Amino acid sequence: MHNKTQDNIASVSLKNIVKKFGDVEVINGIDLEINDGEFVVFVGPSGCGKSTLLRMISGLDDVTSGSILIGDKDVTRVQAAKRGVSMVFQSYALYPHMTVYQNMEFGLKIAKTPKAEIRKLIADAAEKLQITELLGRRPGQLSGGQRQRVAIGRSIVKQPLIFLFDEPLSNLDAELRVGMRIEIADLHRELKNTMIYVTHDQIEAMTLADRIVILRDGNVEQVGTPKEVYENPINQFVAGFMGSPSMNFISATYNGTGGFDVYGKNLTSSLKLSNVAKDEIITIGIRPEHLSLDGSLEFSLIVKVEATEYLGGTLFIYGVTEGGEKITIENRHDKTPKIGNKITVGAEMSYLRFFDKNKRRIHRK
Ligand SMILES: Nc1ncnc2c1ncn2[C@@H]1O[C@H](COP(=O)(O)OP(=O)(O)OP(=O)(O)O)[C@@H](O)[C@H]1O
Ligand SMILES: [Mg+2]
C-alpha cells in the first residue's frame, strides 16, 4: 500500500471544471472538494455528466478548462496511468482469453512490478474478495458477481490512492447487488482509500456515501451527507430525486399569518414561512413514508385510492388528491383500502418541506 505521506494525500479538488464535446458543454464549471479517505457518491439523471466527471478525474478524458488536484498536486495534464487512480466499470472489461490471475496481473506486468510482489498482491486481493479458487478460470467461466469481484481485484492490486467506480453493480441481480454493496463498504473500511462511486441505486448512495453529490445537467445541485440531502434538500429537484418512491408535491397558497390553503381549504393556522408573500403559490413536499391514514393530524388531505401494492412489510397506496395531484403513501401497519374509496391521510407538520415558484427551498420562520 502507498504510504500516505504529506505529499500524496488522496484528496481531490475540482476547480471550475468545464467539459465540452464539440460545441456542447456537458459539464458547466464544477467545483468540488473530496477529502482524503472519503467515500463520495455521484448521483443524477441519465446524461447529467457523472461518467464524464469520473473519466476526467481518472485522466481517461481531458478537461476543456479548469483544474484537477490530487493532494497538492495539479494532475490536470498528467496522464491517466500516473495519477494513482484506478477505475472499475459497469462492464467489467476483463480480457476474455486470460485467466483471472492474468487479468489481475496485466497492469502490474506493464508497470514492471517484480514477479514475487505481483504474486503477493494478487494473493492478498483474491483472499479479500474471496476469489482465490477462481484464479485459474477465464471470465467466461464466472458468474456476474464473480467477474465484478475480479474487476475490483484488478483495481486493488494496482494500489491506487483513489478508487473510481462507475455503476459497478448495475449488471448484477438484486441479491448479488446487496452482497457486493456490503463488500464494497467493508473494502472501504479496510483500505480507507478515497472512493468516488457513481450509481443510479438510491440504497447504494444512501448506505455507502459519506457525502452524496447530486448532479443535474452538468451542475452540482447539492453536496451533503445522506441525511442532509434526504432531510434538507436545498431545492425541489434534490427533494424529488433523492428517495424512492419520490417525495409527493402538493400545490398550496401561502396565506400570510394563517399558514396555507390547499385546494381552497385552510390547513394550518400556525405555520410561518420566510420570504414568502401573502397569496404566493408554493409547493409542499411530503415523503410517502411520512403520510399516515390518521386524519386527525394538523396537515391532512382527502385522497381517492387508485391502486395499492402490498409488499408484506410495506403497503404502497397510490391515489389522487382533490386537486388532481398524484400522491403515494407508504405504510407499515394500516389495512389495505379499497380501490375507488376516499381516505384521509395526514402528516406531522415537522415533516413538511416547502418550495417557492422557482423550486427553491423555503424555510420556516
Ligand atoms: N464522447 C462523447 N461525445 C459527445 N457527447 C458525449 C460523449 N460522452 C458523453 N457525451 C454526452 O455528455 C453528457 C454526459 O454524459 P455522461 O456519460 O457523463 O452521463 P451520465 O451522467 O454518466 O449518464 P448515465 O447515467 O446514463 O450513465 C450526455 O449528454 C452525453 O450524451
Ligand atoms: Mg454514466
Image (tube, rainbow, N blue to C red):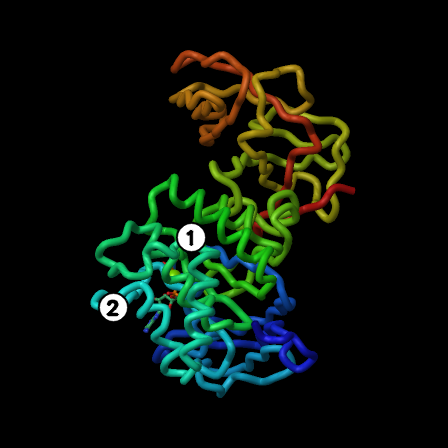
Q: Which mark is residue 183?
A: none
Choose between 173 and 137: the one closer to the eye.
137
Choose between 45 and 283: the one closer to the eye.
45
Vertically, is 139 above or below 317? below
Q: Quadrant of ligand 2?
A: bottom left
Question: In the rendered image, is residue 26 in sight?
Answer: no
Q: Where on the picture, by quarter, is residue 298? A: top right
Image location (x, y in percent) of residue 108: 40, 77
SS for dot 1: loop
**Looking at the image, which residue sits at the far bottom?**
77
Identified by mark 1, the residue type is Gln
Image location (x, y in percent) of residue 80: 44, 81
SS for dot 2: loop
Choose between 165 and 259: the one closer to the eye.
165
Identified by mark 2, the residue type is Met
Choose between 204 and 255: the one closer to the eye.
204
**Looking at the image, which residue sits at the far front?**
116
Q: Quadrant of the N terminus?
A: bottom right
Vertically, is 339 above or below 179? above
Q: Is residue 313 left or right of residue 227?
A: left
Vertically, is 188 above or below 228? below
Label 2 vs 1, first from the N-terminus? 2
Image location (x, y in percent) of residue 361: 64, 48
Q: Residue at x 54, y 63 (%)?
A: 195
Q: Residues within 10 Å of mark 1 (few under 14, many from 20)?
A: some
Image location (x, y in percent) of residue 267: 66, 25
Q: Which residue is mark 2?
A: 98
Q: Residue at x 61, y 16 (%)?
A: 294
Q: Which mark is residue 130?
A: 1
Cβ atoms at labels 2 and 1 below 8 Å apart: no
Question: Is the distance from the Cβ of mark 2 to the nearest ligand 2 atom less than 8 Å?
Answer: no
